Structure formats: C-alpha cells, structure tokens
Amino acid sequence: ATPSKFGKLIRCALNERYNHMSIALDNEFKELYSFARKKNHLPLEAGFVIEDYYRFSLCKEVPINCRVYKIPLKEEQYEKLLISIDKVRNDSSYVYNLFSALSFPIFKGFYVKKAFTCVGFVAFLLNNAGFKLRKKPWKYSPNSLGIELEPYLYYVGELADFNNFKENSNVNPSYFKKVNY
C-alpha cells in the first residue's frame, strides 16, 4: 500500500487495501521488478522498473503495509521467469497500461500489446513460468491476484520490517530528481 496519491486513488477506486505488486527472485529482495512510474514527479512516464524500499516509501517515514507471497517454482519455471523478465527489460517499447489501470473499476482490465499494470506484469510472469492462473494477466487487481496466491502467503506486515528490507535498500537519486515537463 504505497503512500503516493495515485496509489491512494487506486485503493479508493478499487476499494482494496493494496495498490501495487512487484516480483522478487530472492529472499533478500535485492531487486524487485514491476511496472510503475520511472520518475517520481512524472507519473505518465512509466514502464518496467526495478524497485526498492525508497521508491515504495517515497523517502517518507510512513508505514507501508504489505503482503509477501513465496511461490515455489521448479528450476525450468524459474528459468522461464528470468527469460520473460529479460525480454521485457531489454525492450524499451513496453509501457505502463495506464488506460487499463484507470478504467479497471468499470471494465475490469483490458489487453494492450506491450503494456502492463504492475499486477498484470506479475501475473504475466507467473503465467509464462507455467504457474497456472485462473484469469488473463490484465484481469487482475492486487486483491484478486492476492486471493489466488493466498496459499503462498509468507508475510503480512510493514515492508520496512521484512528481512531488513529498508536497511538493505539504497536511495536511487535519479528517481527523485525533479525534471522539467
């Protein structure tokens, strides 16, 4: 549950407790992958990002409630996950699916080629790795995917307290640098 205005808007519009999803490939959360804004002050410039605690918190001392799921994957599933991440990371034409995110309360998500919401990206990766989901990736909200992943729930609490995530993160100054429109 990120403290951004857009995050609060998503939670309010969906009537859900959480507004964002990322995927990590290790227990230490060294890198979390998602789709979100690339610069804090440019909400429309969004796409594939690597996240850390300070992006989530916006460098504010606020509690960030989170849920962490630990999903077991076979080695070949993990390899497929890595390939999918690398494919998206190395293709700059992927963008954030803002229209699906904004219209989700009405249309419940829609497909746009080479575009993801944060939760759609996580669902896409899991699906590509062979983890069978009940819906198309773009049809999930953070809550609905969380319900489907409930058997794998590993942690509920404050993000800063999970595996010393805050202490192991470094501020990325380029994310917070103000730029001219």
Image (spheres, helix red, strand yellow):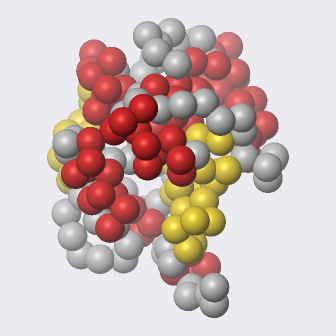
Most foreground residue, 89 or 110: 110
Q: From the viewer's perspective, is 54 left or right of 158?
A: right
Which quarter of the picture shows residue 121? top right
Closer-to-camera residue (153/13):
13
The residue that appears at 61% across and 79% down in the rendered structure is: 174
Query: Which residue is farthest front?
Result: 106
Identify the residue shown where x is 32% and y is 67%: 5
Above/below status of 79 relative to 121? above
Residue 105, by quadrant, is top left
Residue 87 located left or right of residue 123: right
Residue at image point 60% right, 59% down? 46
For image coordinates 36% across by 36% down, the residue present is: 106
Position of residue 145 measured from the top left corner of the image (x, y, whole percent) = 36, 26
**Viewer-proximal residue, 39 or 160?**
39
**Where the C terminus falls, by quadrant?**
bottom right
Q: Position of residue 79 (x, y in %)?
A: 70, 23
Q: Is residue 160 visible?
A: no
Q: Relative to 37, does residue 14 appear above or below in the rendering?
A: above
> In the picture shown, does residue 165 fall above or below 25?
below
Q: Is residue 179 left or right of residue 3?
A: right
Nearer-the-camera pick, 25 or 67: 67
Query: Can you say whether 106 is above or below 17 in the image?
Result: above
Instruction: Examine the rendering and report whether any part of residue 177 can be seen.
Output: yes
Q: Position of residue 69 (x, y in %)?
A: 34, 30
